[in-house]
């Protein structure tokens, strides 16, 4: 059974998936702009989503209804005990679609550095070598290795003729023993790619071509990405071993950047053709400047600061064409030698002479500001030579905004100078072994400024005290946080995700109270400070005080008010099982004002409680006030109930949630499009019941257009998102009723047809070859979808879409039609079973 993810989770996954791993055969150099690069090496086999045939230990467990579909396998051999407690292990078994072992599949684990925070915490390893192996005669593999704490990992498996399988983890803990279970590889298909100019001529061979599967990603699994191999005889690239379903084809050139075509349908065992059209400037007569900055890499010069001199130019030419935030384009240049100049006061002036049209220039800029850090022991006056330093950008709207200037274990500069900064305000966070951490502000660092900063460290400074209840008892295990007092100015949001950055800027340290409620927070900081003791959500005590640096404070008493503890009970049909059910609970006053399907348990205002085998859960503590409670099903994706529990006073609160009429049913779903299976289509179940929580489960179908899911009982319509040639949405007219604890079969055949619409020129009626068009479709909700398509070499538009009307407009139509009234006057075509009507239309 696949996980049913709420829209926010899917949106986050989509954003994460934008971090695409570089494919095999790619250039090791940086790829700018449209695709944020990771440090993953070329790894053909790293990213895929094959069908799971059994549960994977160490990942999220699959629901029981899918287990009924899983193939019974011989259990893997028992894990051998590692001689090194830090050593981790990955193992698994792979089969081909006919159930035979996938013998000789290449398995490799690539590790590379993670985010700056993990690098600062763990440091980079002295050495790392990516472990590799091949599957044995039973299709099994095992990799043993010691995972660096600062690394993220991608595991890839590939066997010729089959789509690659891949997993990705943000970290792997030392000693982790992870079994991926038994996975059936999917048979692969191929795409033959040509890249042409609008007139049909070749766009050259200096492209790196990739195909990425557009299918579902769930758990630790990743979608497939493969690179194409160029054949100079045919001037085409062949991408092999992609899984069936919709894929995106993309090509990258160092000068031309990216061109893409989504919705290329791959079929196992077949080769489909795809033509990418490059309609940009002539690469031979342009100069592209790609800018790199650091350590504050999100800050880059504007296009007005990037200029070109010399050659056939009579005066300096400022850049007027950019793609992305890094690449600056000077097209249509006459032959000659030019000079690239970047003159921005935030950076040192940069130039490159002798540049010819047809070249790309990489400009690595140096920031114009610097700080000179002096770290001294306050008591002895002796310099402290071993320290690390992070810098945080303040009052900015970019991310990331924290950077390691000197990493833990790194060597600080002998003169303390840290350069290449840009003008803005910063907070410096310094750590030195044996001393408490210390923060200092650097306000309004100016262009060209070099500012001295001194850290006076003390081993003796500390804030001590006790956290007590309203009754005066010491409270053990309570988180205590120390802040600079200006954290409350002008205001502070203690509980929301949006307040995190502000809190981090002012936080000086954290600890937890001992058995008697006592705490001690070492600090080198002096001045007005604030203590916060967190007793629960919406429940904390605050004390502001003045502290003298390098001293131990007098004992400080922090009182946490009495709170609320909720005990809930779910009422379920006879025979129901509560395994995996959870409750999300938060104070009404703090819960975000958003659709419940958009809530996320990572919000500080929400506590998550597991439901036990008797249908009960306990959660707390909270501040006094009404509580917002959401009950979610086994997959954590559909909200079954949402109630406000009234709370008037501190203490224990009990509440029952009657789910007997809403208890989930098991649904086997199969979708066909125009009579053919719909591999990897996405399906929504749209609730038609009133007074139900707003939650629309969505399902990513497998390679055969099938899946089994659990859905709350009730009445639904099925919405199919085709994700094919192009994107479209279709809603069933039929409705489906699911009974509590029942099992239902849903079979959908979307009335969609594949036809070719002929498009001709207005003058003369010749085929409108390679003509960009906007094709518009109105959904029954009134929303208008816009597809940007290009006719083929014969002036045709080959589409697989549901029946109904569509409209054609110019590709650059302005304004873009958004509602039905905007379609009046455009060319209409009715898409029906017998073909498009009319079959031939003039280009708009």
Image: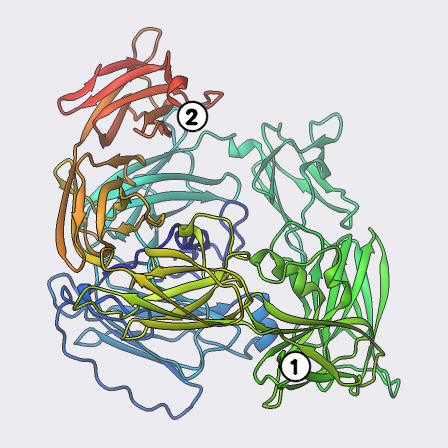
- Specify the farthest residue to the right: 381
Q: Disc 2 or disc 1, which is closer to the eye?
A: 1
- Residue drawn at x 58%, y 71% as measured from the top left: 119
Q: In the rendered view, tell whether residue 654 sits above or below residue 659.
A: below
Q: If the image is split into quadrants, where does the N terminus sit?
A: bottom left
Res 321 → quadrant: top right
- Residue drawn at x 79%, y 87% as measured from the top left: 460
Q: If the image is split into quadrants, where does the C terminus sit?
A: top left
Measure the alpha-carbon separation of dots 2 and 1.
Answer: 58 Å
Residue 818: mark in rendering: 2
Camera-nearest residue between 777 and 384: 777
Q: Secondary structure at mark 2?
A: loop
Visible residue check, residue 83: yes
Query: Residue 584 appears at what percent x and percent y?
Result: 42, 63
Camera-nearest residue between 288 and 219: 219
Camera-nearest residue between 186 and 821: 821
Q: In the rendered view, tell whether residue 24 sits above or below residue 308.
A: below
- Specify the farthest residue to the top: 764
Res 561 → quadrant: bottom right
Q: Which residue is mark 1?
A: 467
């Amino acid at each position: 059974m696949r996980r049913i993810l709420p829209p926010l989770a899917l949106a986050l996954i989509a954003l994460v998936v934008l971090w695409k791993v570089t494919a095999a055969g790619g250039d090791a150099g940086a790829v700018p702009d449209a695709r944020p690069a990771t440090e993953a090496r070329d790894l053909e086999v790293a990213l895929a989503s094959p069908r799971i045939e059994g549960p994977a230990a160490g990942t999220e467990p699959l629901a029981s209804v899918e287990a009924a579909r899983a193939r019974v396998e011989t259990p893997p051999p028992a894990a051998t005990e590692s001689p090194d407690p830090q050593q981790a292990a990955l193992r698994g078994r792979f089969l081909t679609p006919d159930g035979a072992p996938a013998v000789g599949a290449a398995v490799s684990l690539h590790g590379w550095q993670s985010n700056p925070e993990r690098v600062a915490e763990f440091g980079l390893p002295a050495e790392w070598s990516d472990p590799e192996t091949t599957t044995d005669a039973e299709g099994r593999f095992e990799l043993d290795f010691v995972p660096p704490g600062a690394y993220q990992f991608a595991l890839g498996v590939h066997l010729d003729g089959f789509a690659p399988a891949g997993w990705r983890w943000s970290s792997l803990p030392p000693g982790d023993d992870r079994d991926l279970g038994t996975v059936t590889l999917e048979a692969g298909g191929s795409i033959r790619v040509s890249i042409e100019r609008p007139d049909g001529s070749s766009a050259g061979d200096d492209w790196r071509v990739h195909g990425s599967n557009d299918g579902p990603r769930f758990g630790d699994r990743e979608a497939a990405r493969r690179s194409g191999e160029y054949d100079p005889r045919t001037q085409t690239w062949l991408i092999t071993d992609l899984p069936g379903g919709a894929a995106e084809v993309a090509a990258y050139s160092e000068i031309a950047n990216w061109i893409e075509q989504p919705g290329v349908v791959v079929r196992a065992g077949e080769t489909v053709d795809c033509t990418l059209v490059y309609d940009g400037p002539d690469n031979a007569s342009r100069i592209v400047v790609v800018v790199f900055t650091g350590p504050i890499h999100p800050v880059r010069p504007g296009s007005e600061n990037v200029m070109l001199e010399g050659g056939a130019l009579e005066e300096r030419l400022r850049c007027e064409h950019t793609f992305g935030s890094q690449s600056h384009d000077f097209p249509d240049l006459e032959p000659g030698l030019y000079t690239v100049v970047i003159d921005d006061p935030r950076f040192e002036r940069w130039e490159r002479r002798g540049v010819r049209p047809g070249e790309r220039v990489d400009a690595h800029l140096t920031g114009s500001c610097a700080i000179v850090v002096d770290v001294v022991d306050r008591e002895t006056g002796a310099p402290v030579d071993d320290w690390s330093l992070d810098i945080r950008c303040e009052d900015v709207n970019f991310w990331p905004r924290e950077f390691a200037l000197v990493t833990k274990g790194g060597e600080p500069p002998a003169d303390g100078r840290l350069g290449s900064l840009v003008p803005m305000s910063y907070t410096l966070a310094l750590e030195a072994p044996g001393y408490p951490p210390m923060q200092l502000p650097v306000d309004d660092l100016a262009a060209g400024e070099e500012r001295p900063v001194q850290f006076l460290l003390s081993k003796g400074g500390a804030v001590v005290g006790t956290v007590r209840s309203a009754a005066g008892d010491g409270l053990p295990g309570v988180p205590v946080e120390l802040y600079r007092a200006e954290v409350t100015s002008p205001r502070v949001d203690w509980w929301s995700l949006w307040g995190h950055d502000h809190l981090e800027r002012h936080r000086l340290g954290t600890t937890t109270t001992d058995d008697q409620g006592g705490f001690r927070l070492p600090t080198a900081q002096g001045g007005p400070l604030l203590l916060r003791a967190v007793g629960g959500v919406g429940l904390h005590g605050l004390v502001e005080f003045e502290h003298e640096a390098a001293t131990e404070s007098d004992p400080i008493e922090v009182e946490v008010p009495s709170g609320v503890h909720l005990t809930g009970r779910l009422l379920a049909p006879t025979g129901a099982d509560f395994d995996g059910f959870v409750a999300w609970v938060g104070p009404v006053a703090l819960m975000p004002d958003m659709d419940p399907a958009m809530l996320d348990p990572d919000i500080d205002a929400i506590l998550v409680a597991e439901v036990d085998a008797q249908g009960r859960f306990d959660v707390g503590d909270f501040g006094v006030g009404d509580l917002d409670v959401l009950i979610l099903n086994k997959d954590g994706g559909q909200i079954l109930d949402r109630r406000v529990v009234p709370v008037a006073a501190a203490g224990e609160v009990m509440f029952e949630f009657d789910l007997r009429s809403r208890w989930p049913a098991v649904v086997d779903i199969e979708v066909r499009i125009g009579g053919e299976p719909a591999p990897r289509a996405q399906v929504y179940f749209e609730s038609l019941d009133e007074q139900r929580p707003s939650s629309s489960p969505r399902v990513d179908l497998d390679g055969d257009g099938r899946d089994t899911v659990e859905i709350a009982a009730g009445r639904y319509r099925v919405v199919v998102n085709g994700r094919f040639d192009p994107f479209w949405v279709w809603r069933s007219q039929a409705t489906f009723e699911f009974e509590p604890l029942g099992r239902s079969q849903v079979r959908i055949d979307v009335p969609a047809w594949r036809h070719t619409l002929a498009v001709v020129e207005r003058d003369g009626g010749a085929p409108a070859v390679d003509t960009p068009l906007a094709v518009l479709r109105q959904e029954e909700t009134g929303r208008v979808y816009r597809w940007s398509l290009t006719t083929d070499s014969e002036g045709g538009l080959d589409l697989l879409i549901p029946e109904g009307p569509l409209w054609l407009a110019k590709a650059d139509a302005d304004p873009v039609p958004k509602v039905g009234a905007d379609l009046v006057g455009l060319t209409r075509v009715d898409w029906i079973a017998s073909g498009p009507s009319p079959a031939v239309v003039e280009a708009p």
